[in-house]
Image: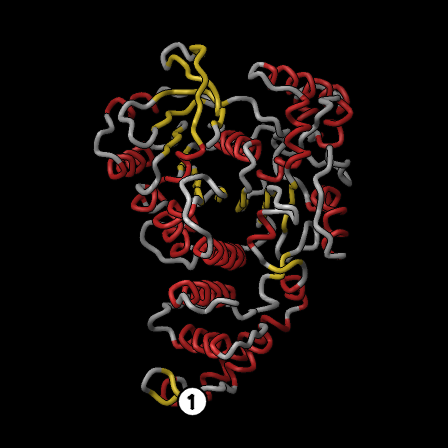
Amino acid sequence: MADFLLGGQIDATRHERTGTNTIVSSSDLTTHGVIVGMTGSGKTGLGIVLIEEALRAGVPTLLIDPKGDLTNLCLGFPGLAASDFEPWVNHGDAAKAGQTVAEFAAAQAAAWTTGIGAWGLSGADIGALRAKVDFTIYTPGSASGVGLDIVGSLQAPADMSDPETIGDEIEGFVSGLLSLVGIEADPLSSREHILLSNLIMHEWSNGRGLDLPALVGMALTPPIRKLGVFELDSFYPPKDRTAFAMRLNGLLASPSFGSWMNGQPLDIETMLHTADGGPRCAIVTTAHLGDEERQFVTTLILSKLVTWMRRQSGTTDLRALLYMDEVAGYLPPTAMPPTKKPIMTLMKQARAFGVGVVLSTQNPVDVDYKALSNAGTWMIGRLQTEQDKQRLLDGMTAASGGVDVGAVSDTIAGLAKREFVLRRAGKDQPEVFTTRWAMSYLRGPLTREQIAGLMADHKTRAAAAVPGEATAAPGAPAGPESGAAAVA
């Protein structure tokens, strides 16, 4: 069990630190966490601090990053020198400050030195983190970061003894694939979903793996004659199957689709641990993808995580941490996108396996509060609307009837930037805290060229099938672009 330093308690009326640090135990995160706050609240900064603390404790992390902000975790400079910051400075931010890039970089270096120093941290702590952890940015469907072979192979699992796990993994893959071609499919009633699921199960049950081209071919000429009690041709006539197979083939024929089948296999164990068992920070950024593609990638990764989780032994310690930024589109209150089921499964079952889940959102009204009610730790920043605040309070009340809703509501209304209300599992009295300074340089989302520069060595090693080793500090990017330096 480890203690995570998230910040320090403050007097909510004077907005001043009391001298008491805000510590969250790693074991508390096995009951999951929620971070909520509007743009500019400091929500993403708090998330990065929490991830840094998990990594410092040796806990591997898997990050779903739809905006690209979490790539900043790769920007840690042990020397805290202006020359380290300068290649990563946003030129637009320097111009707004009325400074040259070099002057702005020097100011940023000084701010980071002072900022982390106020929390008892130094460049040595940044260096220790980078030496301990392998940071990898995965970019499915793009060659900028480390590629992931999302759809290239459907290898038969070595262990077929758990029908629920196998069924959930197949359902996740098929739901994600169909969403990619614009089909919203109910697993229990959709002909397309039922056909593909049965085809995969048929091959796996016979000890055979397959790839997506083979699956498309089987959809046209299936090796099975019945689906349930009906003859295949009655349940799904050949003419309709041909139209469906043509639709899937159009996906395969797209020139850009080849990148989805390039890269290292989607293997959760490899993403979380180095060859010698060290922790990894796996950042899966999907900022470059469209909505359907994000759903597809996220569904597959979460389904694989559920499968990996169920094969672990039970533990009360925090074994791994899943962090999902801007979860609203993946966990809506009424709709059932393919991502929703694996998230709900993780929120309900992951605790027993030591897998913590932290969900972050700026729009609590767009998130299923029943899922949020499974979280034991709540961190609430400034909110945009009364509706957002009420939805959040509903979730907190469902999680624990002992919370003083009126007091929490009043406290939330008075929060400043980087201030949060912390509601701990099993404690009725919340506390107000300000976040510590992040060790990572929060410069905003990285460009594709910058990611490519950071991950050049990783891609070379991945191509050679050699496990990556952590580096002391990131190299310079291909070229900076303007953008927001403050991360919400």
Q: Secondary structure at mark 1?
A: loop
- At horizontal 68% and vertical 34% (from top left) the residue drawn is 131
Q: Nearer the viewer, residue 384 or 344?
A: 344
What x and y, as percent, mark residue 477? Answer: 75, 38
- At horizontal 32% and vertical 32% (from top left) the residue drawn is 425
Vertical arrangement, residue 161 with respect to residue 401, above or below: below
Q: Nearer the viewer, residue 186 or 289?
A: 186
What x and y, as percent, mark residue 186? Answer: 36, 68
Q: Nearer the viewer, residue 251 or 212?
A: 212
Q: How many marks?
A: 1
Q: Quadrant of residue 99?
A: top right
Q: Nearer the viewer, residue 419 or 128?
A: 128
Instruction: Specify whether residue 414 is in view.
Output: yes
Instruction: Specify whether residue 40 is in view.
Output: no
Q: Residues within 10 Å of mark 1 (few under 14, many from 20)?
A: few
Pick out the residue farthest to the left.
Answer: 401
Residue occupied by mark 1: 225
Vertical arrangement, residue 238 with respect to residue 357, above or below: below
In the rendered structure, the answer to whether residue 435 lies left or right of residue 486 reads left
- At horizontal 29% and vertical 25% (from top left) the residue drawn is 408
Color scheme of the displayed model: secondary structure
- At horizontal 46% and vertical 88% (from top left) the residue drawn is 239
> Given the image, on which type of amino acid does mark 1 rest?
Arg
What x and y, as percent, mark residue 255? Answer: 68, 68
What x and y, as percent, mark residue 396? Answer: 29, 35
